[in-house]
Amino acid sequence: MQYTARYSSHIKATPAQAWAWMTSVESISKEMSPILRMTMPAGVKDLQSISFESGKPLFRSWFLLFKILPFDFSDFTLEKIEPEISFVEQSTMGSMRSWRHERRIEPANGGCLLIDELTFEPRFGGWLANKFVGIFFTHRHRQLHKYLGHAETA
């Protein structure tokens, strides 16, 4: 069964600041912490500086539960990057038949919206995997507000 989800945060950051955050390996780690840590090859500092061919896996990344226990992997694959607008990752994972993650920025009063749209099909434990993804992305968006601030709406 395939699941879809959308998470958005109105953050107090310019689109350029949000872009720098969402493509930085250090920032991705802060956002995932302490639930997960995602490994990256040595020397990779941000997604925007990676040379890639659309749809071709770049590297295997391990997901470490609570930063220490390997529990899943992703053959990390970028479909597209539009600087200061969005990126689309469509990777194969140990736990997912398919995983598509689009992260984009939209200008908004007092900052910008950072939006995550997910489409995924777990290999097993469908509703439980869906629940975990929901908890994890809700956590990520709380971390966004912690580090980038929450923009007030008019």
Image: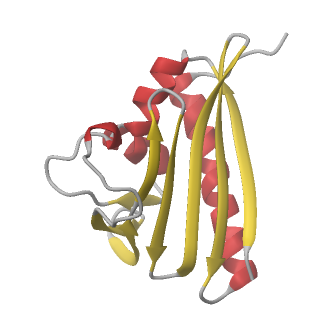
Of 75 and 52, nearer the camera is 52
Q: Considering only vertical position in the picture, is 149 above or below 105?
A: above
113 sits left or right of 86 in the view? right
Residue beneath the point at 45% across and 82% down = 94
Task: Look at the image and tell me whether residue 145 can be seen.
Answer: yes
In percent of width and height, residue 49 lies at 26, 38
Of 48 and 5, nearer the camera is 48
In percent of width and height, residue 152 lies at 76, 15
Of 145 and 4, nearer the camera is 4
Residue most toward the left?
43
| Colour pattern | secondary structure
Residue beneath the point at 48% across and 26% down = 84
Q: Considering only vertical position in the picture, is 45 above or below 61?
A: above
Q: Quadrant of the C terminus?
A: top right
Task: Look at the image and tell me whether residue 33 can be seen.
Answer: no
Residue beneath the point at 19% across and 57% down = 41
In percent of width and height, residue 76 lies at 37, 64
